[in-house]
Amino acid sequence: MKTIVHNPFDREPVAEVPLVDWPQIDEWLNEAQLLHRDRHGWLAVHERVAILRRAADIMRERAEDLALQIVREGGKPLVDARVEAGRAINSVDLCVQALSDGGGHEIPMDLTEAGAGRTAYTFREPIGPVVAISAFNHPLNLIVHQVGPAVAAGCPVLIKPALETPLSCQSFVSILHEAGLPEAWCRFAPCGNDIAERMVTDSRTAFFSFIGSAKIGWMLRSKLAPGTRIALEHGGAAPVIVDSGVERAAVIASLLKGGFYHSGQVCVSVQRVFVPAAELKDFANDLGRAAEKLVVGDPAVAETQCGPLIRTEEVDRVERWVDDAIAAGGTLVCGGSRLSDTLFSPTVILDPPESANVSRQEIFGPVICVYGYDDIDLAIEQANALPYAFQAAVFTDRLSIANHSIGSLAGSAVMVNDHTAFRVDWMPFAGLRRSGLGVGGIAYTMADMSFEKMAVWNWPEGGFRSDR
């Protein structure tokens, strides 16, 4: 069995990748369990640091090749693929930094008489074998966010990439091996969904890291073996509150980036924008005119700003959702049509009904919806009404509105005068409600993949005897 990787823009085959069957996965899980149980065989921290530093150096040397691979398999415009490759390299560096910054701490024991005469401290140990499943939209940096922390924490890891974009994952795993990581500590495991489910739900899996759809993530969580820890990163329908009287050009420039970056195929992409009713039509028209100027086409061309959707079926779905929203009463400001079997035009819809899919589901395509409000609290109430909550944003030059929005919006992060898709790789990144479980970000993921072990010393009278 194999998967054929296609260029999302022209659907030409790029590569063939053999799929792994269950007997091989079963062998690798056994191997991972044995590696973890052999405490004296664990990789020392200094060995992990050296491996990760060498891997980052190799990636720096191959940064342009890695970026071009992201373009070929994922359809991300070259300018953004180069940014992703740079972020992935920085993410590996952050794993090293987190090892330097992390560690345990002393626990005070003599706060009561019961603890008197004792000393206690904590230190971190790896949680055990990690199984990770990743998404297509950031085919290199997402893999680094799942695999890098596992290697840094000292966990053996099996990684299943999205089958549309396995090449960047394969490259990163190969780079780790080239940098000195023994192959048994990190396995590239492209496989079918049925085998992936067996791998995830196996009792030998200590930690499951998932980036992908909420439907699949929550289903897999319900089937985990007792004791398996988990982190889920899904998506949302990110809301933006625009205050009255703010400087419009800067807001629109930010929304263009946050809504149409990678053609909206981002879990925190700008989707629902709430604007004062008195400014609504002018704002929507200005946003639409700016969206119409975006360069849509071949992601390998340096000038391209919006590339293809990952599958032709996604173009069909986005077109259907947009058509339904317009038929239900929304006003099409710009776009709204397929440009080819793989491209969809950047689209702005004015006041689609709350019942429309574009208002209540994650679009994951190049569509921004704009709604009017007379009362900012009602706008925030509408922004919070969905069963998803991830990152939100407010644009304002009033401190009171900024603070009010930070306190009132349901997201795990609220951006002030920035779009919802803003992220740096060291910050916490957490979906709430149906949008996920746990906290992403390099240091936070490393903490998830390890645990604080405590040693409590009850000192004998006269001290310890000499071992000699």
Image (cartoon, rainbow, N blue to C red):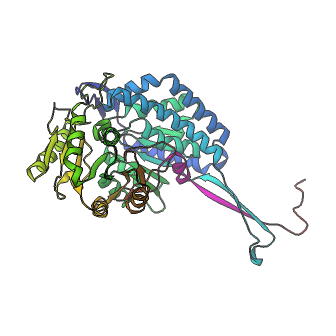
Residue beneath the point at 91% across and 67% down: 462
Relative placement, left or right, of 170 versus 10 is right
Q: Position of residue 337 (x, y in %)?
A: 14, 37
Instruction: Name above or below for residue 283 compared with residue 85.
Output: below
Residue 450 is one of the magenta-drawn residues: yes
Count of labels shown?
0
Q: Nearer the viewer, residue 195 or 71?
A: 71
- Residue lying furthest bottom in this view? 113
Q: Residue at x 47, y 25 (%)?
A: 63
The quarter of the rendered structure image containing the N terminus is top left
Q: Is residue 421 magenta?
A: no
Between residue 20 and residue 112, name the one nearer to us. 112
In this view of the protein, which residue sits in the foreground, 182 or 52? 52
Residue 278 in view of the camera: yes
Residue 330 point in image, percent of width and height: 13, 50
447 left or right of 87 in image? right
State the residue at coordinates (11%, 46%): 323
> Whole-percent x and y of residue 23?
40, 43
Does residue 379 lie above or below 157 as drawn? below
The residue under the point 56% across, 41% down is: 95
Task: Identify the magenta region.
Answer: 436-457
Q: Residue furthest left?
A: 327
Q: Is residue 231 above or below residue 189?
A: below
Whether residue 202 is visible: no
